[in-house]
Image (tube, rainbow, N blue to C red):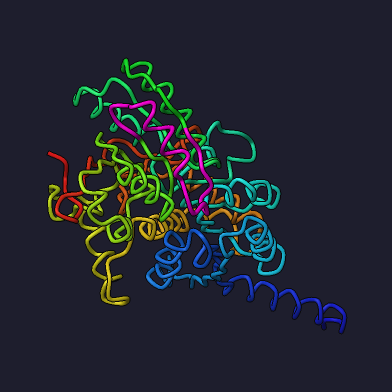
Amino acid sequence: MLSKTTLSALILSTTFLSSLAHADIKIGVVTSSTGPIALVGIPQKNTVALLPETVAGEKITYIPLDDSSDPTATVKAFKKLIDEDHVDAIIGPSGSPNAMGVIQFAAESGTPMLAPVGTAAVVLPMTEQKKWVFKTTQNDDLIAAALVDQMKQSGVKTLGLMGTADPYGENWAKVMKGLTEKAGIKIVASETFQRQDTSLTGQSLKMLMASPDAVLIAAPGSSSVMPETTLKDQGYAGTVYQTHGAALDAFLKLGGKQVEGTILAASLMLVLDEVPDSASKTIASQYVSDYKQRYGENPATFGGNVYDAGLLLANAIPTALKGGQPGTAEFRAALRDALEQTHELAGTQGVYNITPADHSGFDERGRELITVKGGKWALLK
């Protein structure tokens, strides 16, 4: 006969094991759905409702939080998700500066972080801390290479840079310096600004004085519009290039006729009707359709970055379950390892091949050269 103490221990053990067997997989999602970069964060927040509800028979519980575009609030959100909610992974945050400030918390807690941000600095150069970070946007150099090739073919000899004074703009300036030197293009002016600035007249006048053949604006979301409209207001007639940070319909609405002819490189989501059939086109079309049915409008590509994070997790979870139960350090470590083994996974942004050295994993299938034509996005031909 079992003693009372042994029986109690057995009951507790059985209850504990039962709770583990039925534990939900918890995914935190931190977006900037309010504040200066809300145009980036709103489609990301909305996309949470379209993420997988179950994977390999396990229920997925998403815990969304808004950081109001404030890096300090991002830290608080991450700590809550890690220390109080005990999440198995975190998707987010929306902004590059916000992401740079929370990498250490993801690494210290051993929690995989899927960052839908622009700057490659969250995963490059690879470090012990960044091993816990995966990035669902194309790295800057992949997008920049397409733009510089187009500039060279168009006869651009001199270039001006206008970028945000944060990790996004800084990394773009670094990448462009190397690529333009190799292409024989001289950078004759470089200006920076804050995302919340309300006037860029001074920077624009300096750019006009340098008289470059073309200008590249490196800024995410709505902050990409004012530099271009200010340049046009002051009479700049050269070609304006933008990064994939401007790849949202709000850019067209806010910029109007002044952004006509803009050239950028971004995912196929903006020009689905013009690109050949592919696995990414099928997935992106379904995502756009589902989003439009639910919200009555097309999503910005930033929403696709969060959708792809869900696809990456859904692909990795079956393997990770062999390494531990959800809610444990063993499961989170196995999930990180499985994400790092992602091979030929098609998403809305392209095809992912993640390796220990490359936690973004895109190739040329993750970019298209696009222009603004007649107030709409069009494949550059």
Question: Which residue lies at the image location 45% right of the left edge and 57% below the top edge?
Answer: 313
Q: Is residue 259 above or below residue 325?
A: above
Q: What residue range appears in magenta?
A: 191-215
Residue 159 in picture, x, y percent from top left: 34, 26
369 or 103, nearer to the observer? 369
* Quarter occupied by the C terminus: top left
Give the mark count. 0
Q: Position of residue 242 (x, y in %)?
A: 33, 42
In the displayed structure image, the side of residue 90 where residue 183 appears, left or right: left
- Taking depth in this image into account, of 26 and 363 the one nearest to the observer is 363
Q: Quadrant of residue 56?
A: bottom left
**Residue at image point 41% right, 36% down:** 205
Residue 130 lies in quadrant: top right
Question: Which quarter of the figure is the N terminus placed in?
Answer: bottom right
Position of residue 328 relative to residue 372, above or below, is below
**Residue 345 lies in the magenta stretch:** no
Instruction: Please tell me whether residue 193 belongs to the stretch shown in magenta.
Output: yes
- The location of residue 278, given as percent across then percent down, is 18, 49
Q: Position of residue 89 (x, y in %)?
A: 56, 58
Which residue appears at 60% of the width and 54% of the height? 332
Q: Quadrant of residue 167?
A: top right
Tell me: 84 left or right of 351: right
